[in-house]
Image: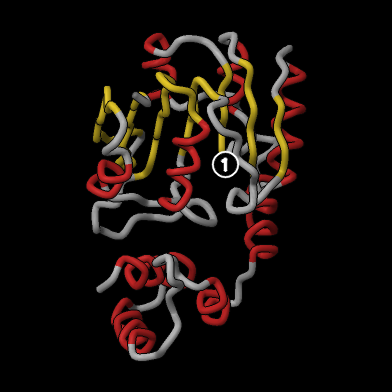
Amino acid sequence: MSHSEDKLLYLLYSKTRVNPIYYFMLLFSLSAQAGPVRGNGATDPSTYEAITGESADEEKAAWDSFYRSRESGFKNQPVGFLRDHLTMIPKGRAFIPAMGIGQNAIYLAKKGFLVEGVDISEVAIDTAHEAAKKQGVSIKASASDLDQFKYPTDRFDLIVVSQFYRDSLIPKFKAALKKGAYILFYEKRDTGKPQKQVSPDDFLVKSSDLKAALKDLDIRIFQEYRDHGTEVIGVLARKP
């Protein structure tokens, strides 16, 4: 099974949750057809949309709905892995892709970082701006699809990627880092076992895949552990 087929299988399972036997049947059918995979190895969005009925606009709507339902209960707490290891990272300019409603961004702003963030959900961005204002800090954030976002080069001292993972974006994150800068990941670990899905996409990642994606960086910390009942990976790496 290719990486693209495996990725498509996971996407289909995470969206519809039917008997996995049908997925292998469907995957076999797709493999026999021409054109389900792009030349760069990525799953063709039109194939995924044809099966799931979802488009980029529907993805945005799903995340808007997700964050809207959580606005009133928002607590501005950063992930523990970031809080525990921030002393290793010099203050500077930070970037938060898939920022969500701003818990990590606001925490970094309070610690003296200049923070920029991006999220596909305008509801999340508005919520983050409002929360930052109430807490007396400033963040610069915008709503954008990260696949279409124009990434700067050699700009950031820290990038924080939390509960979001897309391997195609890793080279862009690396290019956006200054020499000697840090990138931190906090991800849900793909253990190969079914897990309860609590958001539109839980972005599971295998430890081996994350290590491979960061092999050209200086990995300072790579930790697999259980956090509040969830298997996670925490990584802190430095760009040589």
Query: Measured from the top left, where is residue 113 in percent x and y?
Result: 59, 14
At a point 77% along the width and 27% down the height, the residue shown is 130
Left or right position of 123 against 62: right
At a point 67% along the width and 65% down the height, the residue shown is 58
Q: Does 13 appear above or below 107? A: below
Camera-side residue: 148 or 59? Answer: 148
Query: Measured from the top left, where is residue 189 in percent x and y?
Result: 31, 46
Other residues around mark 1 within 10 Å, as few (<14) / some (14–19) / many (≥20):
many
Q: Does 4 appear above or below 176? A: below
Task: Residue 131: tell me if it is visible.
Answer: yes
Query: Measured from the top left, where is residue 63 in percent x and y?
Result: 63, 52
At a point 68% along the width and 40% down the height, the residue shown is 124
Tell me which amino acid carries mark 1. Ala
Quarter of the view holding residue 122: top right
Quarter of the view holding residue 17: bottom left
Task: Residue 11: tell me if it is visible.
Answer: no
Q: Which residue is mark 1?
A: 98
